[in-house]
Image (spheres, grey):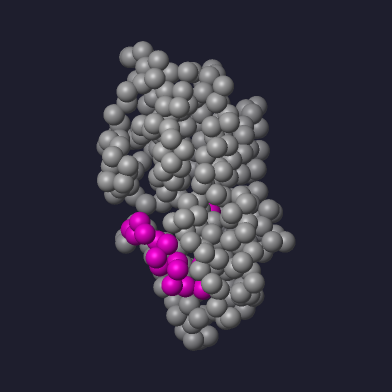
């Protein structure tokens, strides 16, 4: 197939940008041809450069003839439809999908257009689209399991990695780690973007994150705690991921909105004490079953008419 993959912006390293990169890689490995559209054409940078470097794809070189269009965010949908008004791209219009990654951000809201179809990454987002009387298909985040390789869990937690951008959250976590003699590291994607985050995850035993960061750490066999401070919601957390609660947390994309637990020092410490090396093996197995890049890419392809 010839596939167009769209994304709002490619000048930062966040969850949806990594989702897009992974989707491109998976489709190429399956033998398909891929073009990439950036909805905000002026927001090119670190990720568009990486796409060019790794795959030889020049973003926003739209050639047409697409059998399938997978477009994250409103801007990439609207951009494609503007281009189609001006040019006959020879696109199969029955196979244009908006991928909605969240229910809260404005860019994630569905664009309601005749014939447009929808893919969501959680049951929470699917229910949100149902409020607009829109049908959708759930496909969970693809993770490159060859990149995010399994690392043998240690007997006890000696190091913790936070993917939070919140100074308040990281200060809380650091104070606990100092008291418990645990090494603490954090990464703020806005002030210190790191593409090869798997190298940092590999050096730690436990990871604190939301959403996609959780799935990548799970793939590496880490104990994962769903917790953070985010500007768009109250300080809500779910806690440590286990086989018993995984699917409940997944309904809300490991956002903390399932449990809505207040993120306190006591809550964070309690979850650090729940570290269990066996959990690492369970997390990798879940990732292999539900996030494998190739398996997930095939699910997108199966939707094409």
Q: Can you see residue 230?
A: no
Q: Quadrant of the N terminus?
A: top left
Depicted 49 relative to depicted 177: above or below: above
Q: Can you see residue 60?
A: yes
Closest to the observer, 291 or 150? 150
Report the residue at 42% width, 23% height from top.
66
Report the residue at 44% width, 56% height from top.
147
Whether residue 282 appears in magenta in the rendering, the answer is no
Side (left or right) of 8 relative to 221? left
Side (left or right) of 162 relative to 123? left
Closest to the observer, 88 or 26? 26
Query: Where does the image place residue 172, in percent across and percent down from the top left?
Result: 49, 74
Total numbered badges shown on the rendered structure? 0
Query: Where does the image place residue 176, in percent across and percent down from the top left?
Result: 51, 80
Query: Where does the image place residue 74, in percent across and percent down from the top left?
Result: 45, 32
In magenta, the rendered stretch is 193-211
Report the residue at 64% width, 29% height from top.
135
Depicted 252 relative to depicted 284: above or below: above
Snapshot quadrant of residue 188: bottom left
The residue most toward the front is 31
The residue most toward the right is 244
Closest to the observer, 260 or 100? 100
Report the residue at 45% width, 66% height from top.
201
Query: Where does the image place residue 243, in percent across and percent down from the top left?
Result: 69, 61
Snapshot quadrant of residue 257: bottom right
Q: Quadrant of the C terminus?
A: top right
Snapshot quadrant of residue 138: top right
């Amino acid at each position: 197939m010839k596939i167009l993959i769209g994304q709002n912006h490619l000048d930062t390293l966040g969850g949806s940008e990594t989702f897009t990169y992974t989707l491109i890689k998976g489709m190429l490995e399956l033998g398909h041809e891929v073009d990439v559209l950036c909805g905000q054409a002026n927001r090119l940078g670190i990720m568009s450069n990486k796409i060019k470097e790794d795959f030889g794809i020049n973003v926003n070189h739209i050639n047409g003839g697409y059998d399938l269009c997978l477009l994250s965010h409103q801007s990439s949908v609207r951009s494609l439809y503007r281009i189609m008004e001006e040019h006959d791209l020879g696109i199969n219009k029955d196979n244009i999908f908006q991928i909605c990654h969240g229910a809260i951000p404005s860019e994630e809201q569905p664009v309601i257009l005749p014939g447009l179809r929808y893919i969501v990454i959680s049951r929470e987002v699917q229910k949100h689209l149902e409020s607009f009387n829109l049908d959708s298909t759930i496909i969970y985040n693809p993770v490159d399991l060859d990149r995010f390789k399994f690392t043998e869990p240690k007997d006890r937690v000696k190091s913790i990695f936070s993917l939070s951008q919140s100074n308040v959250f990281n200060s809380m976590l650091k104070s606990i780690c100092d008291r418990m003699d645990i090494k603490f590291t954090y990464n703020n994607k806005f002030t210190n973007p790191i593409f090869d985050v798997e190298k940092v995850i590999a050096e730690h035993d436990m990871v604190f994150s939301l959403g996609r960061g959780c799935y990548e750490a799970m793939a590496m066999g880490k104990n994962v705690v769903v917790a953070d401070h985010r500007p768009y919601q109250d300080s809500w957390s779910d806690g440590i991921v286990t086989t018993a609660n995984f699917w409940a947390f997944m309904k809300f994309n490991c956002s903390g909105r399932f449990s809505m637990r207040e993120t306190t020092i006591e809550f964070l410490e309690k979850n650090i004490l729940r570290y269990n090396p066996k959990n690492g093996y369970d997390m990798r197995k879940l990732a292999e079953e539900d996030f494998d890049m190739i398996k997930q890419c095939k699910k997108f392809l199966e939707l094409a008419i």
